[in-house]
Image: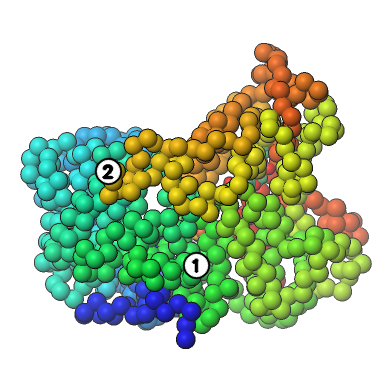
Amino acid sequence: MTQYPHLLAPLDLGFTTLKNRVLMGSMHTGLEETKDWNRVAEFYAERARGDVALMVTGGIGPNLEGSVLPGAAMMTTQDDVKNHSVVTDRVHEAGGKIAMQILHAGRYAYGPACVAPSPVKSPISPFPPAELDEEGIEKQIADIVNAAVLAQRAGYDGVEIMGSEGYFLNQFIVTHTNKREDRWGGSYENRIRLPIEVVRRTREAVGTNFIIIYRLSMIDLVPNGSTMAEVIQLAKAVEKAGATIINSGIGWHEARIPTIATSVPRRAFAWVTQKLMGHVSIPVITSNRINTPQVAEDVLAEGCADMVSMARPMLADSHFVQKAAQGNAAQIAPCIACNQACLDHTFGGKLTSCLVNPRACHEEELAITKAAQQKSIAIVGAGPAGLSTAITCAERGHVVTVFDKAAEIGGQLNLAKQIPGKEEFWGFVEWYRTMMDVHGITVKLDTVATPDMLDDFDEVIIATGVAPRDPGIPGQDRDNVVSYIDILKGHHTAGKRVAVIGAGGIGFDVSEFLVHEGTSLTESLPEWMTEWGVADPSEHRAGLAPEGPQPHAPAREVTLLQRKAEKHGKRLGKTTGWIHRAALKMKEVNFVGGVNYERIDDAGLHISFGEARENPHVIEVDTVVLCAGQEPLRVLADQLETAGKTVHVIGGADVASELDAKRAINQGTRLAATL
Ligand code: NAP
Ligand code: SF4
């Protein structure tokens, strides 16, 4: 008897059956744009082999004006059909099913040709859209239907029509973006005419035995968005027009409420999808922050939906479903919802990958094969760099020993997991622990590795990490000046007024830690909703609380300082930096930039501004926390190299500047693949 009976139950769609209740949600990986269709095919086939029931491709444009970017993948020609057939064939050979997402971006299209119901520029694009006339609207419908017909010809099992997240069809539904007075604007019936027409004509064109998923915005989270009654009305009309499945969209891209970041509680929006259940007779999918089989099972068992969509978790582990079905859920590499290698890459114009799994989207190039010759490998340092290296070495058949001077594995991840909103790191460290056991890796904790202990190994890998940088501020040896490590390990409790020196990732994290007390908001959905101003869309239009965000009072008065004069958090993740900034602003954290640190004394932290050291003054604080970056810890590496030994140095011990777990894990995995 499986632990996940709801998750693993097949779903009969009448003309075809899905083998379980897991949909791999659409992701813009950038793979389709490489035009290397074998590589695209391998990405999806690998996930099909992992037993996900149905996958949705990244958004494919139906025409030039609707494509997300100039050069983005489209489905408009016979060549496109031929290329996509490589993907569908490979997926079918692997026993999977795949639907192509048709994405018309409307005013979100990042190019001068973009079109929309009304000429209302989006806050997240510099391009003002042209208003469509009747003929223009008919062209868009015809192009979307054409893309669906071509997708069917290319062998797809279905299409997903993207109607949420503030894209083209969604823009017609909401008065904020639809100011029209013709039959496509005005009343709600008129505003939903376009999505319904698109579904109706698509069904007419593709016949009955073809999946049409309609992705419907269940909670817009932008002013003038839909009410739940309107959402239900649209869902019923979409069903009548011929959709096979309704998928949930949560929030427009321009919404200022986080919807998928790691600080969003797990399954935070399943209750919204649940409100649709019973109103339509076709299957309904829920989405967002579902990242373990148990969470997915609970959501389904509670009747929130008929299926769950997981996208990023399928990057972290292509065999998520298979491992769950085999009773090996603890071995599923967890998606920690960091966005660092997926969405941040997408929005930075880079190919998607995954922090936890650097092989994601690099399946062919980063192959993990059995080593020709088994070696004994020593790895010093049990942080993410060392542990990931250990796993890949062991997968390749090597005999691995990991040393760490600490009493537990995880390195800096153990600091990260203390931050409110970063609870996913607990599971990440737990996964590493499981994998050490699964692969029979010897882990020697509380052990300071010395050169002679490493003599007998075939390969030695140094992953000793980093040490905090000494900022050399006069007075920093005072008792009330501490490092982030002292704070996060609980060795020191900060006073009520705190200055944080350094506004990098760690300075932001430590500030977050200092302004919160009690249960993390991420662990309490009602409190998180109050904090960010999320309401029930049955009561308040678009799910926006009329009173707006209602942050809890900060636990401390925090000043976050940096020497650079640039905006605080400018170098944080592209898709999450705004959340960190907004969260600290809500807690009244004072951002001070362009400073010189003069000294620390009884009065507090003395600063001045700019090269001329102007405007000297003192920030009166009880505690100063140093988060001034890191330096490589290379003592052992240097000793070994001086003794003439060949060693591999990875992670922070190699280069500490702008180090993050993504780079460390990628470097370690790639090294391990070659040994
Ligand atoms: P960091 O991002 O390099 O930031 C170091 C901070 O210290 C900067 O604000 C820098 O700003 C300041 N600084 C540098 N040298 C200084 C000096 N001599 N005296 C005073 N201040 C100095 O490093 P980090 O915050 O330690 O983070 C380490 C890595 O972990 C980063 O790559 C970071 O991205 C990653 N991380 C990421 C997250 C995330 O949310 N994605 C969270 C935590 C950590 P000024 O030079 O302007 O003063
Ligand atoms: Fe998840 Fe982070 Fe990997 Fe993206 S990069 S899939 S958010 S773990």
In-image side of 331 versus 97 (left or right): right
Q: Residues within 10 Å of mark 1 (few under 14, many from 20)?
A: many
Which residue is the site of mark 1? Answer: 292
| Residue at the image point whose x is 79% and y is 62% from the top | 407
Q: Is residue 138 above or below residue 45?
A: above
Q: Position of residue 413 (x, y in %)?
A: 67, 56
In-image side of 93 versus 384 (left or right): left
Tag on residue 541? 2
Tag on residue 241? none
In this view, the residue farthest toward the bottom is: 1
Q: Nearer the viewer, residue 554 or 184?
A: 554
Q: Where, quadrant-wise, is the C terminus in this rendering? A: bottom right
The amino acid type of the residue labelled 2 equals Arg
Could one spot residue 84 in this view of the protein?
Answer: no
Where is residue 24, by image quadrant?
bottom left
Q: Position of residue 533 (x, y in %)?
A: 40, 41
Could one spot residue 423 in this view of the protein?
Answer: yes
Q: Is residue 323 above or below residue 30?
A: below
Q: Is residue 492 above or below residue 370?
A: above
| Residue at the image point whose x is 17% and y is 60% from the top | 236
The number of callouts visible is 2
In terms of sequence position, does the residue under pointer 2 or pointer 1 come before the other?
1
Q: Position of residue 249 (x, y in %)?
A: 32, 55
